[in-house]
Amino acid sequence: GESVGLHLPTLSVQEGDNSIINCAYSNSASDYFIWYKQESGKGPQFIIDIRSNMDKRQGQRVTVLLNKTVKHLSLQIAATQPGDSAVYFCAEKGASGGSYIPTFGRGTSLIVHP
Amino acid sequence: DVKVTQSSRYLVKRTGEKVFLECVQDMDHENMFWYRQDPGLGLRLIYFSYDVKMKEKGDIPEGYSVSREKKERFSLILESASTNQTSMYLCASSPRPRPVGYTFGSGTRLTVV
């Protein structure tokens, strides 16, 4: 079946550095991708999304890059802060029970050291 | 601030009990979802609903049922709780026509002993 996965389960960075979290997807028909952030003890929170007709989208301190050729998605966080420490999930619009149900990756834990 | 509220943060139940997990959203969203989250397995979809009284099975519906009697409320039912249902349960909602833009609740950590 289709899958969404993350290259690294844990990423440690120093405060102030830029962070890059990667995600590979396998469904070439996926046309919508989302990044979520989950802090300890909380539910996932929407960060940023991107459609397949775009290569890049920027938000506040975050940028998502989409490379459809190699089916790769990344989340870049500029000037990482301790408050960015969380688990980050990518999701793609999948086919689990319906064309709009996303498939979630397993998450990467970002640890920011002060 | 828009919210998805799950009635309990922590629950401890005995094997064989019938367990109800409640979720309420105040955003008038049509779509509601129940996921379980386990270490190393990520988020797995149990059931979802596109409208009142409507339900669809997700990837792992066995041992669960749901109820959507009102638009704002989506309940997950464990008919006879088992230890392998110990998990974090997450409810989410989203509007049409873009159900992927989820708002999640804070989760219910259920322990079955």
Image: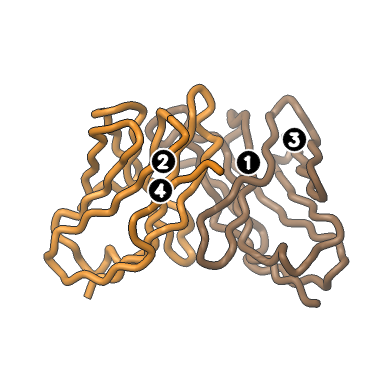
State the SS at label 2. strand
Q: Which residue is mark 2?
A: B25
Q: Residue at x 20, y 58 (%)?
A: B19
State the SS at label 4. strand
Are discs 3 and 1 located on one and the same chain? yes
Front of the two marks 3 and 4: 4
Cα gap from disc 4 to disc 2, whole angstroms: 9 Å
- Identity, as a three-letter code, of the amino acid under mark 2: Gln
Front of the two marks 4 and 2: 2
Q: Return the chain for callout 1.
A: A
Q: Which residue is mark 1?
A: A34
Are discs 4 and 1 located on one and the same chain? no
Locate the C terminus of chain A by quadrant: bottom right
Give residue B15's quadrant in the image: bottom left
Q: Are marks 4 and 2 in contact (CB under 8 Å)?
A: yes
Cα gap from disc 3 to disc 2, whole angstroms: 39 Å
Colour of chain B as rendered? orange
Q: Sequence order check: which comes first, mark 3 or mark 1?
A: 1
Q: Which residue is mark 4?
A: B91
- Identity, as a three-letter code, of the amino acid under mark 3: Thr
- Identity, as a three-letter code, of the amino acid under mark 4: Cys
Q: Which mark is residue A69?
A: 3
Front of the two marks 4 and 1: 4
Are discs 3 and 4 located on one and the same chain? no
